[in-house]
Image: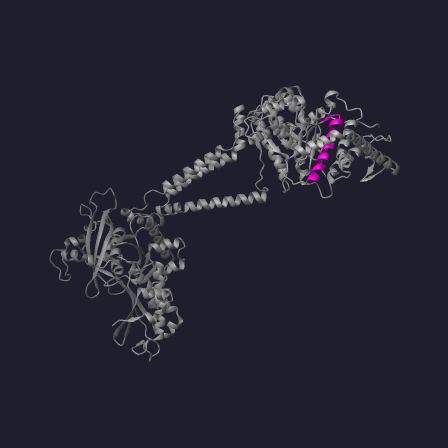
Amino acid sequence: MNKWRRFKLFWMDHWVKTSIIFAACLLVILSIWGMASLESYYRNITLAQLPLQILMVILNSVIFVYLYMVIFRGGFSKLDKKNIKGTAVNVKFSDVIGIDEAKDECWEVVQLIKDHARLKKIGGKILRGILMMGPPGCGKTYLAKAIATEAGLPFLSMAASEFNEIFVGVGASRVRQLFKKAQRLSYGFGGCIVFIDELDAMGQRRTFNQFGSGEGNTTQNQLLVAMDGLSDKSENIIVIGATNAAEDILDPALLRPGRFDRKVYIKKPSLEGREALFRYYLGKIKYEAAIDCKRLARKAVDKSPADIENIVKESALIATRNKKDVVGLKEISEAIERIELGMKQKLTINAREREMTAYHESGHLIVTYLSHPRDDVFKASIIPRKSSLGVVHPTSIEEWHGRDRETLFADIKICLAGYVAEKIKFNTTTTGVTADFKQAMNLAHFMVWVLGMGASGLIGDYTVYKEGNALLLSEDVKMRLNQDVDKLLRDCMAEVEALLRKEKDLFERFANELLAKQELDYDEIEAIFNEYGKANPRRFSGMPPANGSPKA
Amino acid sequence: MNAPHKGTVPLEFLKGLSLFFLIALALSGCGPVTYPEVRCKEHLQKIAREEYGIPRIDVEFQGTTLGVFLPLDHLFAMDLKTALMSGSVTDMESLFQPTEEAIDKVEDILFSMSRVMLSTDKKIDFYYLQATDVEKSGMDLTFIGQIDDLKRVRFWDIPRSEYRKRIIHDLRMNRAALWHRPVRHFFKDLNESSADVIQNRYFPNTAREKWAREFFFMDAQGSLLAQGLGEWTVLDMRSIPLQGNDVIVYAKAAFVPKDPKNKEFEPGTSEYLFQVSTAGDTETIQRIIPMAYLGEKTEDSGLSFTRDIVMRSLPHWETEFKTPDITMGDFLSRQFTRRFQSIAGEDERIYNTFASVKLIVRFEPDPKPHFIFNAVAPLRGVKETAYTSGQGLHEDVLYFWGRVAREFVDVLRSYGFKDYDFLEFQLFQEGKLLSWTVSREDLELFRRHKKDLSSILRLSQ
């Protein structure tokens, strides 16, 4: 029975090829027969013309195929259905590291796929679609492959963008082709997994207007119909979609039960996850035994598995460039810095500007170190990178999923610290505060208008009262809110100024250190603070300093 | 689980198939020639018989010329003698209009010849087809062509109109065909007619017993038969005219029993001399003399042949069909004759200037190979002369010769023919033959318009 099905599957897949081969064989035999029966002159003439004829046939075929593909099939960007047998994918669940919660959910899915027959016997609902959501680089594709491997099913992979063409109907046609192929494979192998990456490219909310629906709508409609059609067949086809877009971006029709009825949220890895990821990726290269993966994990807060892989690969490149046999902590730090901060730029800066930058960054540094409840200073630098002349790079010592008032307040203070530092030292300020102010204003506005953290006691999200771009608020309320924002900024600035004036020696020291060394690493920074008797407030108390927040 | 579908196996198979196909095709082209030299004649006769339903053609080779004789019962649509006698003929061309059936047969044979010529290992440069009206007029329609022209027209190297110019077709009287006609009829009657009919037609004054045994109208027991027992086939016929209106026709014929079971006589051949009279409207047989009865000495006062004389002179007797051994020079000269005649007929100036143009081109291989252009073309102006020692050649003669020379050099260049030294123009004037020569090198300059004809003509002394 199974063999007969396989044979039928082969015939369904290859009937055109088989027929062509049969016809070709027949024509070959007839040609040779005909050739042999020709008189010798005509035989020789035919043979003499054969190379030219073959050349002409090839040329004509190429022209025909080219024109056909360009005119009728939207160019050569044909549907690239990566048809892979499940076991050939060879990504096991044990290879999926750092996203354990999602893994557990997916394992359940695998069990459901494997027990497909039993589920049907009981009368249970067959799982049709799984939607994996999460930030980029968290291993959604990897997890889908792992599902295919564990379930032992053929795996068809496509990016949603591959469905899109300028030619009307091509997208829908490709969806039909994809599902037709999936049904065949499912018929032959007992199931098939269709993976559509970046689903948001085709699954966004459909738009309807007087001009009719667009090509994107048509493609999505076809996907909806195809997924609905799966229930009419007994074949075990599971569609796995992956997206890093928010759930409300996607069309509700896609998310309703019967289509993507199982949603798997994949988050960035936890500390343990990051540690495991560092261990996994470092295991693929040679590295110093002294490297502590836990410490690296702490340094890589909010990093995705792809980021961690990139850090390790980059560190290997740096080690190779430095003619080292193994990767050390220095290379990894440099790799993180390069990825986070960007490449150093060779920009000629005069002494005055350099000095102002050093004091500006020292302001950020001191305020971050002494007043931020969560972030450590990973690095301070006055080497130009990207569009900035200097940078203080804060890193959270552990992951947080929300932010409290103190943290937001500290963030504003850090933003303002550069401005205050310039003012204290030089009694003037620079354009270097542009981005700082923008961020500070945004944060303050957000705290007051949205989070109810203003001093006047106005509670609630005042941005929802609007019609178009116009706010439906009284001028009085708007004024009070704006006054709260202003007060918040002024309070922060006052605290920063007080802090920097208080820590004048430290301020001068860091500025001089930066002018001398250009860059200060975490250890150097901590050593200087320790020198001045300033222990890391986060390490020892876990709480923000007593003067860390203004009274509401 | 099966291996994943990669879709490469059929492609590999097709690659292999294509390779096999090409090799097999190449090998099939390495086969022997279709019509080997030794069996060319038989193949051509077989094609004519089996594919075109033409029962009899004669094939022979002379040098590198393939000759084919196609006897036709009815070559022309009109009966020449009747038409001429009626006095209604105003256009001679309509008189020689072949019948559709004859044209079809000629075309079929020409095509058969081309097939054999192109697919044989025998060296053939020219072909010669002679279609003879053996029953009615005795006229020959002949075609001479070159095999390379055939190839070139097939590959569009020359246009079909040019190809037609290169085929030399001619119409001429074949005396032998007319002389042989009663003999052919005689053997046909032996096969088909009754003894009484034969008696009345050929032996009105001879007792039946005298001829019946010779021609198998008598059985072994001596009984006379109404129908002959033998089936006769003419193998060879030759003729020689005697004085007056008589012709002697030599015929060699094969006989076999009509009924294969009849063992009364063995198959064999017989030779006869027929005395044919050409007086009157039709040729008639006067006497039939078996060669076996012809003695070493002439005993018959009316016939001065002995067997020995006949056998020795026979190769020189006239035949209905004889293939010329054509050479390139000969072929070209025949072609030039036709081409130049055509120019003389079509060119208005020549037509208006010369009274009647009769010309011929010959190729003389010895002592130096050269072409001779001889034209009898008197100028229409009575006072004008073609050549005077003082004024040289008349300008109209120069024009005529210029047209001829231009065609000459163009045709020779297209053939790539260089095996000649000069072209000679002959002019017969006041009982004297004057000739001018132009060397091949000068003709090349003339062709390239570097020199005009008057400057390269050299009067021969």
Q: Nearer the viewer, residue B210 or B168?
A: B168
In the picture, residue A208 is in which quadrant? Answer: top right
Image x and y of residue B457, in percent: 31, 70
Q: Main secondary structure of the magenta part?
A: helix
Residue at 86%, 37% in the rendered image: A479
**Quarter occupied by the C terminus of chain B:** bottom left
Nearest the viewer among A44 and B15 is B15
Res A34 → quadrant: top left
Asked whether residue B90 is in view, the answer is no
Is residue A358 a member of the stretch shown in magenta?
yes
Residue B415 visible in the picture: yes
Asked whether, in this view, residue A471 is left or right of residue B250, the answer is right
Q: What stretch is highlighted in magenta?
A: A351-375
Q: Which colour scheme is used?
A: one colour
Q: Is residue B346 above or below residue B417?
A: below
In percent of width and height, residue A508 lies at 73, 32
Tell whether A106 sits left or right of A542: left
Q: In this view, does A122 lie above or below B321?
A: above
Q: In this view, does A204 lie to the left or right of A89?
A: right
Q: Which of A123 and B318 is in front in this view?
A: A123
